Image (spheres, helix red, strand yellow):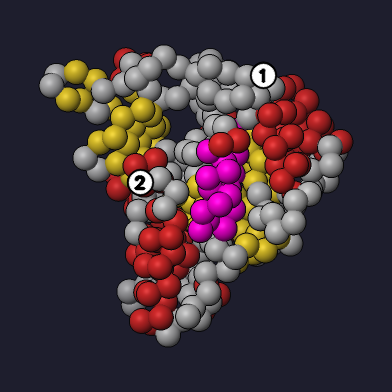
Amino acid sequence: MPSTATTIGNFAFDNCLMNAAGVYCMTREELDAIEQSAAGSFVTKTGTLEERAGNPEPRYADTALGSINSMGLPNMGFQYYLDYVTELQNQPNSKNHFLSLVGMSPEETHTILKEIEASSYQGLVELNLSCPNVPGKPQIAYDFETTDQILAEVFSYFTKPLGVKLPPYFDIVHFDQAAAVFNKYPLVFVNCINSIGNGLVIEDEKVVIKPKNGFGGIGGDYVKPTALANVHAFYQRLNPSIQIIGTGGVKSGRDAFEHILCGASMVQIGTALHQEGPQVFERITKELKDIMASKGYNSLEDFRGKLNYID
């Protein structure tokens, strides 16, 4: 049977599938459910310096082609997740994990990362650059000058394996500009994409979520083409040492296969996990292995990044 095992940096995973940050990752109980599933790893909810309640409900809605949400970064505070993953890493047969974080300002981001640097946690760390830090400013990763400055400051003291979570980019020149920044630093991975921001879903002449008068990030089927484009654009542009985690629109083995074909080393599942629960990993893993077997592929490396073009 083909293997879906993979690596990110120096970390090995039995399966390339995992949850997307924001889904099944708020509490220890939810993370335990992912840990005990067929998923190869989990990423924690993006943790901020202090616990956050997030936006008023309803702030998530399933839709015909996926989902829309405006969560407002609800989380238990980064220390809650740091304590949990540190405990897990000391248990026998523990999987390797991703600890996600962001500050509500660059100063808070540095405070969090310095705490993690000083801790005994030895796993992977994800800095979520797909969050607005300053009212009136775009998401951090859309501001290349700020992104460059933050990463320069971070790598002046941070020595543990670090990657970044990215929003979708839509212009070729932005792929070029973003990659030029990321290639300056010893990042282990980039994770693309977060939801496509500021969509609007209407039912019965009314928005379906409360925050921001109904504006929210869209996920699911809507976003797969954009996610695949971002994965492949960065696969073409980033240093080979920076691997890619593909996220967006994955609800079948075929979807996961396409992310890997575009260059992803791991694949995250968000909307489908929210809708189906942790058993989704077993189903999609089987579907992915069946596709690999039908094509004679024994490992992800047999086809990762080998997307064909039209002559």
Work out whether 240 lies above or below 114. Answer: below
Per the rendering, the mark at residue 50 is 1
> Between 67 and 216, which is closer to the camera in this rendering?
67
Work out whether 307 lies above or below 35. Answer: below
> Between 125 and 58, which is closer to the camera in this rendering?
58
**Residue 175 seen by the camera:** no
Report helix, strand or loop for mark 2: helix
Report helix, strand or loop for mark 1: loop
Residue 35 lies in the magenta stretch = yes
Residue drawn at (60%, 35%) of the image: 28
Q: Position of residue 64 (x, y in %)?
A: 21, 40
Identify which amino acid the numbered label 1 is placed on. Glu
> Between 234 and 297, which is closer to the camera in this rendering?
297
Work out whether 222 lies above or below 93. Answer: above
Residue drawn at (38%, 22%) of the image: 59
Per the rendering, the mark at residue 276 is 2
**Over which residues does the magenta segment extend?**
30-46
Q: Position of residue 11 (x, y in %)?
A: 70, 60
Using the numbered discs, state the Cα–Cα distance from disc 1 to disc 2 in whole angstroms: 30 Å
